[in-house]
Amino acid sequence: MELDSYITTEETELSPAVVVTTVLLVAVFALGLLYQLVGIVL
């Protein structure tokens, strides 16, 4: 619950740089997971 309220309160104050950085981190994390899954399958 605390995390959700924190996210909603911070959302209005987020700067574009923070949003871009967060998206990039999530994308890199997702790509890393996919890479590991492909490595396991192959």
Image: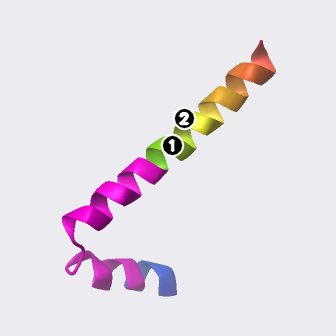
Q: Is residue 10 magenta?
A: yes
Q: Which residue is drawn at 47% across and 52% down?
A: 25
Q: Amino acid type of disc 2?
A: Leu
Question: In the image, which disc is placed on residue 28?
Answer: 1
Could you tell me residue 24's position as x and y percent? 40, 49
Task: Tell me if residue 1 can be seen.
Answer: no
Task: Tell me if residue 35 can be seen.
Answer: yes
Q: Quadrant of residue 33?
A: top right
Could you tell me residue 17's position as x and y percent? 26, 63
Residue reaching furthest to the top: 42
Question: In the image, which disc is placed on residue 7?
Answer: none
Instruction: State left or right for residue 29 relative to residue 39.
Output: left
Q: Is residue 21 magenta?
A: yes
Residue 21 or residue 34, whichever sits in front:
21
Query: The magenta stretch spans which residues?
Result: 6-25
Q: Which residue is drawn at 39% across and 85% down?
A: 5
The correct choice, above or below, for 39 with respect to 42 in the image is: below
Q: What element carries label 2?
A: helix
Q: What element carries label 1?
A: helix
Q: Which residue is drawn at 45% across and 43% down?
A: 27
Q: In which quarter of the image is residue 20?
A: bottom left
**Main SS of the magenta segment?**
helix
Instruction: State left or right for residue 37 relative to residue 34.
Output: right
> Mark 1 to mark 2: distance in Å?
5 Å
User: Within 10 angstroms of label 2, few (less than 14), some, or many (20 or more) residues?
Assistant: few
Tag 1 near tag 2, CB within 8 Å? yes
The correct choice, above or below, for 19 with respect to 12 in the image is: above
Q: Name the residue under label 2.
A: 31
Residue 2 or residue 27, whichever sits in front:
27
The correct choice, above or below, for 26 with respect to 8 in the image is: above
Could you tell me residue 7's position as x and y percent? 37, 77
